[in-house]
Structures are given as structure tokens and as C-alpha cells.
Image (cartoon, coloured by chain):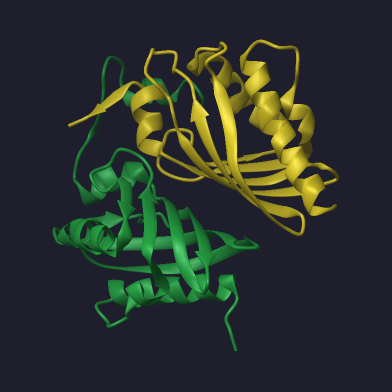
Amino acid sequence: MSTESVSEVIRQFFEASTRAMHSEPVNPLALCHDQLVWTMTGSTPVARAYTGLQEFLDTIGKALATQFRPGPAFGIYPQEIIVEGNRAAVLLRGHGESAHGHPYNNHYFFFIEVKDGKLFKVLESCDGALVNQSVFDMHLE
Amino acid sequence: MRRSNRELVEEFVSRVDRSLKGQPAAVAELLSPDAVIQVIGSTPISGIYRGEREIMDILVRSATSRIASGSVSLIDSIAQGDRVGVFLLIRAKTHTGRTYNAQGDPAGCYFRLSGGKIEEIRFYPDTTQVEAEIYERRFVPNTASPRDAAGDVR
């Protein structure tokens, strides 16, 4: 795949994710490989590797549907996409609100490997403390 | 021969590692005088640090007031033009004996370079571990237990 193609499929995935949270009839997971491996780094309750598209859908897909408030304010915005071969380092900003009503404006850093024109391996790093506080309704003492 | 941007980032990571081990490393030599470092999140060391003085006098001083020693190594990198994205393995011991990242998770980091110097760094540490281990704070549920909350997605 060309540099532009790798970049484009990644942009399309995050754009579709945003549109899905706006309740538009799009499926971002159609841009993910059946053998997707999505690893969330860090120490949050959701941090682990999800192997296979079905497991990702059954866990994170359901969590996204229940732990965030969908609506036009929700958005995931790529800031930088650095492509080398079929892999990209991606910086994103997110904007949204958790189901608990807390702001959820996270920073994300990904390594994404693209295979067969779809997201194949994803390694994710983000502000886990915000995940704990906003999504899991905790505070710091 | 001039080093590639990837090699410069590798050298920077190596120097930070030596510095964390208490060895002379001249880390700032690889930074542009106007370099900007962003540590994401809302931890006590999160923020945007502009220029060598803010980086050394605020960010580095804040970090070393809590961190006694540590290590950093480069796990993987992706480079294109003036930008390099990396995942790092970072571990640290605090002055009170706590360990940051005992589990060995990777942390993302972005570099932008110009003229053989690092102009910008955006660092994505495990902010949960920064709060819990480096600053010894606790995440406490507002209403339900953390186990109940975690159970939503497990």
C-alpha cells in the first residue's frame, strides 16, 4: 500500500468512529481486519490486548455504546499521521462526555499496522488517569 | 556523516537513559533552544514546557524531585520526514521506593525535528501510574466500587 493509502484508511476509520457516535449509519469496524489485535496499554480497567474483531466488538464496542454519551459533540480527530511502510504512528485528540457526565477530552497515541487495506494491529496509549476519572467515575485522593 | 532523525531520537533516548542512571549525558544538547515538550494529562508533571529553561527548571526538576532512578529504552519507531513516533519502555524508582511501570507497559512518544535538533516532544506516559506510584495518590470511586465499574467492560 502507498503512504497515502495507509493514511487514508486510518483517517476513514476515525472519521467513521466519530460519525457512528453521532448515530449515523456507518460501521467503523468494517475497516478493521477480522484478525484485529487491539492492545490498550496502561493501568485502566480496559487495558489489555483484544484479539479478533469479534472480541473487540463484544467488549470495547459495547463499552463505547454504554460508557459515553453519543451526540454531535463527540469527536476523534487525527492530528498527525506518520507513515512508514504499512504502519503508522497516529496522534489524536478526542472530545466527548462520559455516561457519568464528565468531560472526556483525551490525547491518544497509536501505532497502527494496516493489512489487506484494514486496521490489523493497533497499539494504543492515552491518558489513563482521565479514563479512570471520567469513564469509571473515580477521583484522586 | 549526518544522523537521520530516527538516529537522533535513538541517541536522545539513550542519553535520557544514562541520565536516569545518574550518568553524565548532556541530554539538552539534542534539543533546540526553543524546544517544546508536552506531557499529556492532568498529572502534576503534565503540561507544556517551552524552551530549555522551562524544560530543565520545571519539568526535569519536578520529575527528579520524585524519581530517584530509572531506565528508558526504545521498543519500536516509525519515521517519516521530520517526524518520528516511538514506543518506549520506561521504568522508574521513586525516592520513597515505589516503582513506576512495574508491569513493563510501553508508552508512546512523538518527536519533531529540524536541523539535527529536537523541536517538539509529546509524551504519553501511563498517567494512572504517574498518579498512583510517583505521586502516591489513589483513585477512589465516586459512587460504585472500581470492580463494579471495571465490570462494565470485562
Q: Is residue B35 above or below residue A79?
A: below
Q: Is residue A119 visible?
A: no
Q: How many marks?
A: 0
As rendered, which of B52 and B27 lies closer to the eye?
Answer: B52
User: For the point 46% across and 53% down, which residue is it?
Assistant: B107
Residue B136 appears in which quarter of the rendering? top left
> Position of A64 compared to B94: left or right?
right
Q: What x and y, as percent, mark residue A130?
A: 37, 32
Q: What x and y, as percent, mark residue A42?
A: 43, 45
Q: Colour of chain B?
A: green
As rendered, which of B18 and B142 lies closer to the eye?
Answer: B18
User: For the point 51% across and 40% down, which residue is it?
Assistant: A108
Q: What x and y, as percent, mark residue A16?
A: 71, 25
Q: What x and y, as percent, mark residue B52?
A: 29, 64
As rendered, which of B100 and A119 lies closer to the eye?
Answer: A119
User: For the point 52% across and 60% down, which residue is it?
Assistant: B112
Q: Quadrant of the C terminus of chain A?
A: top left
Q: Which chain corresponds to the colour yellow?
A: A
